[in-house]
Image: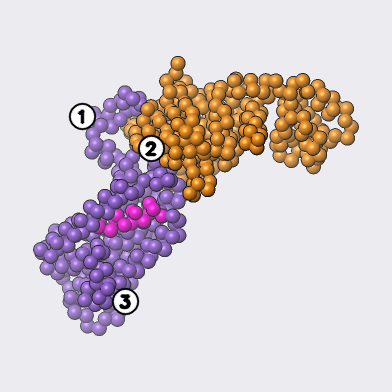
Amino acid sequence: MQEILYEAERVSMIYKKGKYKANKEISLQIRRGEIVGVLGPNGAGKSTLIKQLVGHLKPTEGRVLYNGIDVYKQTRTVAGQVAYFAQEPHVLNALTAREALVFTGQLRGMPKSRAMREADELLERFEIPEARDKQLKRLSGGQKRMIGIGTALIGHSPVLILDEPTNELDPAKRRLVWELISEYNLEGATVILVTHNVLEAEQVVDRVAVINHGRLLALDSVAKLKQRVDQRLKFEIQTAYGASDEVEEVLKGWGIIQRHGANRMNLLVNKEEAGDVLNMIISSEDLPVDEFSVLPPSLEDVYFHIDHEGKEGAGA
Amino acid sequence: MNTLMPSADTGLPQISGRFARWRLEVSILFRIQFATVKDSWMWIILMATLYPLATFLFMRFYTVNPSEEMIVQIIAGNLVFGLVVMGMNSLGQEIAMQKHQNHFTFYASLPISKQNFVIANLLRGLMNTVPSLLILGVLTQVIYDIQLTLSPGLLPVMVLSLTSVVGIGILLGFWSPTFQFTNMLCQALMMVISFLSPVMVTMEQLPYPLQWLAYVMPTTYAADAMRTILTAGWTTGVMLDCLVMLAFTMISLFAVHRLIGWRVSD
């Protein structure tokens, strides 16, 4: 059995004298060497949990243990082993890309020569060698973000905690980031990442924590979470322009609807009812559906299913 | 001697030796800080010189036949003022700005000491302040045609003048609820130090309640030490002032160590 690296024990964060709870009694364990994805909508409490894991935020209740030590009591020890990326490092804006990486590596304890070598390798790997001697403030948003990720990767820390690493990146760079995460994990790094990009995360994560309204709704392997919806099928539907509300009104009784933009939606239905839904869509001449396809559910659908269950549970 | 050795726990090579680690941290943190001002260095020195120089010229124009004692008072006041502006006002505002721009998130993610971050900020501030102090010292001597005593004791007096107020700047910066509020608070403090404490004027010129207030302000001792050392060199009075400033330094640094943190909930 894999060794437990992180353990959150009934962790809560209550702001403003109990008026607002960012997270509530979250308990979880993260094993050494795994990749855990933290999923949830905006304001769900994901970043609060991550800040508690790295020791930047003291839980108002409960505690977080890293290798058996309380992260908030020994933050410097934790910072020496856990590399954390939350956003572009504006603090480094006046440095060149290479300086930013080398200095961060040295502050992590790397010898200068190794930090320089690794910085050059990262710049090559990021496919931005031209950024090497440019100040970060002169780089594009995507390039800056890559350097920010580089500051977490440099030094090969045993733990990587990445908050929305692929935001604002183009598809090629996003793929590169996922590749790097997988490579670092193969070398032994434990990775905890917050992401909205469920479809891409599905390719790399071992387990998924689903969080909403400050509560941990599920923490399990992708395969096991998918079992929760293996009796379901997903309809990906494109409606006629401006007709989404009408289509949703007709379909909402059949399953869980999840809207994507103005004219797209997914409908998650039980397998035994999928035939009826299919017949209805095909035979109904008045239903303004332009295109549709039927697929097995993805991790994203699992997430929405769990979230839907959580809301129903909260409402009950 | 090779100071690098692999850490069994992390696999990362760690730099052994606390001093080597301290020096490396301060040097890198200073370079990060310096990078932010290196393009506008001359402007910053100019601006740092402007206020004391303007005050000095104001006193020159509006003081008829000033006595030597008054001139030294003005010079010492201006020198102390420059150090106080840097150690309290600028440092407080700079740290507050870095806090509100989320720079602490980056620093808190690294195994570095917050004291070293403060030292790096202080060194950067000194780089801007020392040239302006030198310019001011030379100019005032030339304009008033007086000879100041340049005792070696001037260095500890300047250092203690700075360190005795640094804690206030650091506390203001780290505590800062909003940048605007900290900015306002720093400006208000500067008003008190400029006009309501015995920095530019003597203690006797202040109203009685302000004289009492002056006893708990480190700038009072800084100005007194500076004034005495520029005229009479190192004396028992200067030594006592230095001891009081040392006490202010120790208390404020203890408070800084206990009260401030990188973390958002601190």
Label pair 2/1, CB-CB below 8 angstroms: no
Q: Residue at x 31, y 26 (%)?
A: B7
In the picture of the structure, the residue carrying the numbered disc 3 is B58
Residue A259 seen: yes
Q: Chain of mark 1?
A: B
As drawn, B151 above or below A63: below
Q: CA distance from mark 2 to mark 1?
A: 35 Å
Label 1 SS: loop
Instruction: Give the label on residue B207, or none.
Output: none
In the picture of the structure, the residue carrying the numbered disc 1 is B1
Position of A299 with respect to B105 (left or right) is: right
Residue furthest to the left: B236
Q: CA distance from mark 3 to mark 1?
A: 58 Å
Q: Position of residue B161 (x, y in %)?
A: 23, 60
Which region of the structure is painted magenta? B164-176
Instruction: Give the label on residue A72, or none.
Output: 2
Three-letter residue code for mark 3: Phe
Q: Are marks 3 and 2 on the same chain?
A: no
Label 3 SS: helix
Q: Nearer the viewer, residue B112 or B247?
A: B247
Q: Chain of mark 3?
A: B
The tint chain B carries is: purple
Q: Nearer the viewer, residue A23 or B50?
A: A23
Three-letter residue code for mark 2: Tyr
Residue B165 falls inside the magenta stretch: yes
Q: Which chain is orange?
A: A
- Of circles 3 and 2, the one toward us is 2
Q: Quadrant of residue B139?
A: bottom left
Q: Nearer the viewer, residue B228 or A279?
A: A279
Residue A249 falls inside the magenta stretch: no
Label pair 3/2, CB-CB below 8 angstroms: no
Q: Residue at x 74, y 40 (%)?
A: A262
